Image (spheres, rainbow, N blue to C red):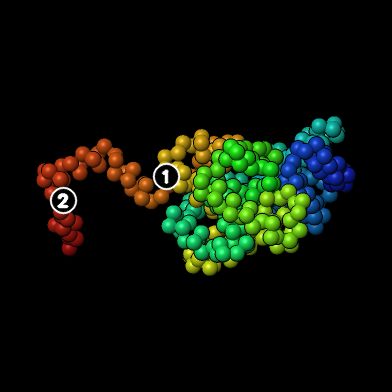
Amino acid sequence: MAFKMTELKVHLQSFLDYRKNLGYARPATARSNTIDLKLFVDFMDEQAYDSVSGKAIIAFQNHLAHKRNNTPASINRKIFTLRSFQNYLELIGLENADQLPFKKVLKIRAPRAYRPHFLTEDEIKILFETINRNNILGLRDYAVFALMFLLGLRVGEVHRLDLDDINWNQNTIRITGKGGVERTLTLNNELQNALENYLAVRHNFFKVQGNKAFFISKKGNRLAIRTMEDNFKKLLEASGLNKDFKVTPHILRHSCATLLNENQVKILTIQNILGHSNPNTTINYYLHTTEQKMRDALEKLPLTLFLNELINAGEISLSFQSERYRRVG
């Protein structure tokens, strides 16, 4: 039996309220769910589908891929929202909810291109040397980006930081990550200095009295994520760094993980610093191997070492064998 769209629409808001009110979904996820469901309903209405069928879902996937140019990951996320909706309908005992086709939709798999999205140590140095620390905004931005690089923090984690999240006696900082999960990290001397220099001038910001936010905007509000992103874009332009990929504040987090890996820090430690619940996330998305490190690793292969010894001892002479490859007319 086909499931009618009119009946589906009746339960949309109760599903969203259920996820939001019980704290099952983060605010950002709840917003994404709302957008995904609206997009699906609008498509069904525009295409005059009065019931949900497998053909309708396939048409929706094609619409996302070819009309909206969504990536495989974006399409899969929207289908996952629909699957969650079906689970909810089955949970409340709605008749024929198990006949919905959402759970049968195949996941789109696409090869993930290798993207060496990180900055080198020299590039990081150039970026931070560009920041003018002779004014309060420069001291603030230096501390903001130092947290992102030296501790691998997300912009949202820096945004949520409060004054009482730092324990100066123990030199630690409490970070509230995704889903409200907290982790405690240690402040090194460089980061302590950056934060202390900012705090020394924090009182000069507008309406700072009684504001618990660690980082303050020029208007006296908690420093917004958008402001951090805009300031980073200006900093990047001023630094003169030109990369063949889009450089955002999140690149500082990638750079942190990559440089820790280059310095032989264990994967589990990097995972804990970044606040990942799954080590595969750390490995697949944040640990990038530099070309030099790959070259050094290949040079350590047993056969390579053996051949190098023979070459150095003069027992093997390498030469181009032109006669062997000469074209025969």
Residue 37 higher or lower than 268, as above or below:
below
Mark 1 residue element: helix
Q: Residue at x 19, y 60 (%)?
A: 327
Q: Nearer the viewer, residue 210 or 311?
A: 210
Which amino acid is tagged 1? Glu
Residue 87 higher or lower than 155, as above or below:
above
Task: Give the crowd class for mark 2: few <14, some 14-19, many >=20 residues within 10 Å.
Answer: few
**Residue 267 appears in view:** yes
Q: Position of residue 34 (x, y in %)?
A: 78, 49
Is the Cβ of the residue at disc 2 closer than 8 Å to that at disc 1? no
Q: Nearer the viewer, mark 2 or mark 1?
A: 1
The disc at residue 59 is none
What residue is shown with label 1? 262
Q: Position of residue 55 (x, y in %)?
A: 72, 47
Q: Position of residue 21 (x, y in %)?
A: 82, 39
Q: Nearer the viewer, residue 37 or 311?
A: 311
The mark nearer the N terminus, 2 or 1, is 1
What residue is shown with label 2? 318
Q: Examine the image and state in which quarter residue 53 appears.
A: top right
Q: Residue at x 55, y 43 (%)?
A: 187
Task: Give the crowd class for mark 1: few <14, some 14-19, many >=20 residues within 10 Å.
Answer: some
Question: In this rendering, would 246 be left or right of 83?
Answer: left
Q: Residue at x 88, y 44 (%)?
A: 10
Q: Nearer the viewer, residue 164 or 67?
A: 164
Quarter of the picture containing the N terminus is top right
Q: Position of residue 275 (x, y in %)?
A: 59, 39
Quarter of the picture containing the C terminus is bottom left
Q: Residue at x 75, y 51 (%)?
A: 211
Which amino acid is tagged 2? Leu
Q: Examine the image and state in which quarter residue 120 appears.
A: bottom left
Marks 2 and 1 sit apart, C-alpha to C-alpha, by: 34 Å
Mark 2 residue element: loop
